[in-house]
Image (cartoon, helix red, strand yellow):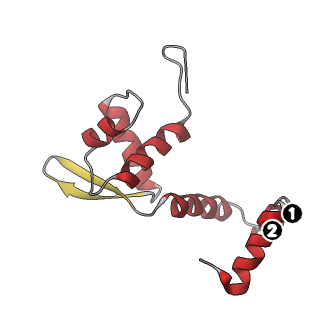
Amino acid sequence: MTDAVGERRPAGELEASVLAALCAADRPRSAAEVRAAIPQELARTTVATLLARLHEKGAVGRTPGRRGFLYFAVDDAHGLTAQRMHRELDQDDDRSTVLARFVERLSPDDEAELKRLLEGDGR
C-alpha cells in the first residue's frame, strides 16, 4: 500500500485486488461493479485498464454486457498463480535450466510435495 498522495501502487497489488473481487463474485461483473468491490479507491478508467490487461494475459474472461463487457475469473486463485508460473517459464528458451534452478531452490517440504505430485498422488 502507499501512504503518500499520488504515490504509485505496485501493479501486482491492484491486479490481485481485481482478481480477488472477480473470484469472489457469483456472476460476471462490470468494471463499475469491480471498482465498488475492491478496497482501493481507483478511477473508473484505471479499473477498466486493469481488466483489459488481465484479459490480454488470459487471467480473466469477458462477455458482452448491456454497456460494455462483463468480466469473470477464468480460474481460482491457485490456478491463476499456476498460469503466471507457466508464463514466466515460457519466456525462457532453456526450460530445463529454469526448472532445474527452480527445483534447487525449493524448501525440503516443497520438494517432497512436488515429488508426491509428480508420482501421481496429485490433487
The image shows residue 122, relative to residue 26, as above or below, that is below
Q: Secondary structure at mark 2?
A: helix
Quadrant showing the N terminus: top right
The image shows residue 27, relative to residue 6, as above or below, that is below
Percent from the top left, x then y, of residue 98? 78, 64
Determine whether label 1 and label 2 are within 8 Å by CB.
no
Quadrant showing the C terminus: bottom right
Is residue 98 visible in this depiction of the protein?
no
Density class for disc 2 (Cα within 10 Å; few <14, some 14-19, many ≥20) is some
Task: Residue at 64% x, 79% y: name it.
Answer: 122
On screen, residue 98 versus residue 35, left or right, reads right
Density class for disc 1 (Cα within 10 Å; few <14, some 14-19, many ≥20) is few
The image shows residue 122, relative to residue 86, as above or below, that is below
Percent from the top left, x then y, of residue 14? 48, 38
As drawn, which residue projects farthest toward the left?
66
In the picture of the structure, the residue carrying the numbered disc 2 is 111
Q: Quadrant of residue 120?
A: bottom right
As drawn, which residue projects farthest toward the bottom?
120
Which numbered dot is residue 6? none
On screen, residue 96 versus residue 12, left or right, reads right
Query: Which dot, 1 or 2, sits closer to the camera?
Result: 2
Which numbered dot is residue 104? 1
Is residue 87 visible in this depiction of the protein?
yes
Amino acid of disc 1: Glu
Percent from the top left, x then y, of residue 93? 73, 66
> Residues under labels 1 and 2: Cα distance?
9 Å
Of residues 48 and 22, the one nearer the viewer is 22
Q: Quadrant of residue 109?
A: bottom right
Q: Quadrant of residue 89?
A: bottom right
Of residues 17 and 113, the one nearer the viewer is 113
Amino acid of disc 2: Glu
Task: Residue at 33% x, 28% y: name it.
Answer: 43
